[in-house]
Image (spheres, rainbow, N blue to C red):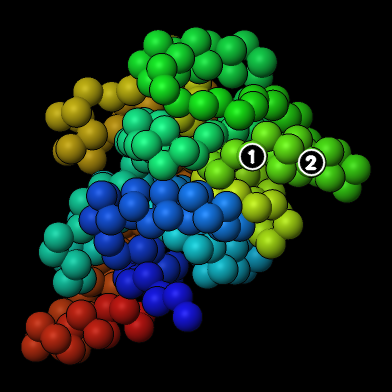
Amino acid sequence: METPLPLQTVIGSPVTALPFKSQIEVLLDWARARSSRVVCVANVHMLMEAKSNPNFASVLFNADLVTPDGMPLVWMMRLLGIHNQDRVAGMDIFTSLCEHAPKRNISIFLLGSHETILSRMQQRLQSEFPDLKIAGAEPLPFRPLTPEENEQVREKIHASGAGLVMVSLGCPKQELWMTEQQGKLNAVMIGIGAVFPIYAGIHKRAPYWVRDLGFEWLYRLFQEPRRLWKRYAATIPPFIYLAIKQILSVYLKSPDGTERKKAACLD
């Protein structure tokens, strides 16, 4: 029987409490076995979406792995007792898997986004990871797929032999789609929507020092102000409130370190 992965609750949602390298190893093991898995790459927006939408909250609770993408989640986990937690961000997951997949004879499938972006991604992947096998690349419409279209997508992925499926539909569409395919698609599905245009060179990724300070959201806001300002205005202030509330409740109720960690996980 498989050992459950350790979890830490952050404002009501479960986040996998493992260092970056350990999470990558788990993903590679699952992909090598062609196991049907759902992986959510979580940031503030995703957790706030789960807070306001019970149906989406169930997606996170039923996911096989939820990575702490945003630095605010990492800081929360450290404050709540997971002192060795580092960031497990979508771009870093993507490039690390592309580097190590060939050593395990694992191929990848790029799903979603637009043909131009997929083409540019494949060109860059072939240059940076020449041993990587790209089993396929399929753009998807941003509307819900029909049952027939979903079946066609599954058949293409199954026929390709891919163990890793990188999904780019945007949150929460990609997470909902992956959940619908759980148990039907024999591959590890990872929702990394924003990674596609960045890796394709359409958008720029924030410098390391900006990411490390937790200001990548601000960097992205400068690039896409019209699309992102409403999202950030609606999610960041309430997240800060809920985060402070959780931390204070844990520290005030449980002065002992062991009890504090236990309380944080059950909050």
Q: Dividing the image into 4 quarters, which one contains the C terminus?
A: bottom left
Say which quarter of the image contains residue 93.
top left
Specify which label sits upstream in the sequence, 1 or 2.
Answer: 2
Residue 42 place in picture, x, y as percent: 42, 51
Q: Position of residue 64 (x, y in %)?
A: 50, 63
**With respect to residue 11, does 197 lie above or below?**
above
Q: Callout 1, which amino acid?
A: Gly
Q: Which mark is residue 193?
A: none
Disc 1 from disc 2: Cα separation:
10 Å
Extreme-right residue of the structure: 148
Q: Is residue 238 left or right of residue 57?
A: left
The residue that label 2 is drawn on is: 155
Nearest the camera: 203 or 231? 203
Q: Nearer the viewer, mark 1 or mark 2?
A: 1
Residue 179 percent coordinates (x, y): 65, 57
Q: Is residue 61 left or right of residue 140?
A: left
Q: At numbered mark 1, what does the secondary structure look like: helix, strand or loop?
A: loop
Q: Residue at x 16, y 80 (%)?
A: 251
Q: Amino acid at mark 2?
A: Glu
Q: Return the residue at label 1.
A: 161
Residue 130 locus on image (x, y percent): 41, 17
